[in-house]
Image: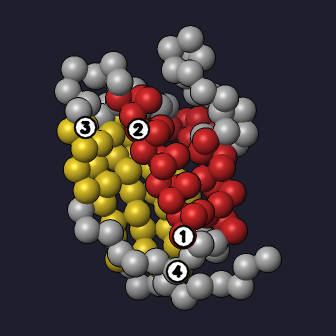
Amino acid sequence: MRLTCDPLPMVHGDSGAMQLVLRELLDNALKFTRDQPEPRIHVFAQDLPREHVMAVRDNGAGFNMRYRDRLFNVFQRLHNERDFDGAGVGLATVRRVVSRQGGRVWAEGHVGEGATFYVALPKQPSELD
């Protein structure tokens, strides 16, 4: 397993919530790279004018982009449960937490080539409920 990380920005938001987001994204990457002969996960960030974008890229199972809208919904699975365990709530939790912080999430992937999951958080914090 090769896990690499570029420097990440300091972001505004709830520390516990951001730890949960990163943990869920890393757990997801670990799950879908476990069958790779040389699993690789890379965490990186982009600094955009109005937001910080953090991403987790892996060389795992990937997914069909046609179904990307289902990724962040509760109990929506793109892979067979016997191949990859889980209840289908991890990425939905990521979306919910990031949305409450005023951010957004999305993903890109290709079957058999891996995936990249993105989290964008505003540089100026928004009012939380």
Q: Which residue is mark 2?
A: 29
Residue 70 in the figure: left or right of residue 121: right
In primary-sequence order, the first of circles 1 and 2 is: 1
Q: Secondary structure at mark 4?
A: loop
Q: Amino acid at mark 2?
A: Ala
Q: Secondary structure at mark 3?
A: strand
> Could you tell me if the residues under marks 3 and 1 are in contact, i.e. CB atoms within 8 Å?
no
Foreground mark, 1 or 2, reads: 1
The residue lying at 43 percent from left, 74 percent from top is: 52
Residue 69 in the figure: left or right of residue 7: right
Q: What is the residue that sits farthest to the bottom in this orientation?
A: 124
Q: What is the residue that sits farthest to the front in this orientation?
A: 16
Q: Which residue is mark 1?
A: 15
Residue 46 locus on image (x, y percent): 33, 70
Q: Residues within 10 Å of mark 2 (few under 14, many from 20)?
A: many
Q: CA distance from mark 3 to mark 2?
A: 9 Å
Residue 61 locus on image (x, y percent): 39, 26
Q: Which residue is mark 4?
A: 12
In primary-sequence order, the first of circles 3 and 1 is: 1
Q: CA distance from mark 1 to mark 2?
A: 21 Å
Q: Is residue 108 visible?
A: no
